Image (spheres, rainbow, N blue to C red):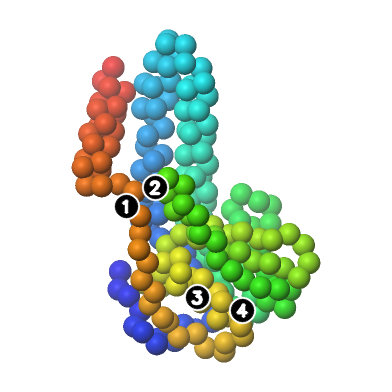
Amino acid sequence: MQKLKKGQVLTYPIDLYLSNKHILLILALGLLIFPLYYYCVPIMQEEGGWVAVIILLLLIILIVLGVIVSLLALLSGKPALQISTNGLTILQVLRKSKQKSVLWRDVECIDISYQVYGRTETWALVIQPKQGKVIQYPLKTMRYKDTLLNEMEIYHIVKLAFEGKPAIHYQSIEMERIKLITKKTKWLLLIIFILLSLVYFFQ
């Protein structure tokens, strides 16, 4: 996808969608459900590793939940995050109220949270309302029209909107990523996935 030019104006409302890469990754993980359930679980049961079975089943449930959320968000056609002059609108596909609105006039401050667990990094938009509980919205690379915005760029846009800027000018912010998967690991995971799939389909 093409990048926005420095200083380019982003017009309100600013609609941010899940990136295609994020959706494809979740769906690819969804394909692991079948070999994990039909091949790995029986082996662990035979060996009496019930703790490992429970952990594996929880992992499968999380993958299923991620696939459902991604598909519902994709099918809804609505932005995952909408930024306007009045506030934020957050998509909630698994709740009765499909969208959660946060008005700027009700917000005390906005910040960003960054944590690292092993080789996994997580970002969250932290919204401190004047009354009520703190809202933490997980940030991922998201799509604005034909452009991908990283977590810091999204935070910068939200911050400017909160400050009441009538026009938001795009500012490119480079981020250093932790390499979660090396080239060799990618090939190894691909081979394992193919072998598990072959065992499942031809057993």
Residue 60: x percent and y percent?
A: 47, 33
Disc 2 from disc 1: Cα separation:
7 Å
Q: Are marks 2 and 3 in contact (CB under 8 Å)?
A: no
Q: Are marks 2 and 1 in contact (CB under 8 Å)?
A: yes
Quarter holding the C terminus? top left
At label 2, counting other C-alpha atoms closer than 10 Å, the crowd grade (few under 14, some 14-19, many 20 or more) is few
The numbered mark, 2 or 1, whose residue comes first in the sequence reads 2
Q: Is 124 displayed left or right of 145 in the figure?
A: right
Residue 162 disc label:
4
The numbered mark, 4 or 3, whose residue comes first in the sequence reads 3
Q: Is 44 displayed left or right of 79 in the figure?
A: left
Vertical order, 137 against 39 (above or below): below
Residue type beneath disc 4: Phe
Callout 1: SS = loop
Residue drawn at x 42%, y 45% is 118
Disc 4 from disc 1: Cα separation:
32 Å
The residue pinned by badge 1 equals 179
At label 3, counting other C-alpha atoms closer than 10 Å, the crowd grade (few under 14, some 14-19, many 20 or more) is some
Front residue of this view, candidates 78 and 143:
143
Callout 4: SS = helix
| Residue 78 appears in the rendering | no
Residue drawn at x 41%, y 69% is 149
Residue 175: x percent and y percent?
A: 37, 67
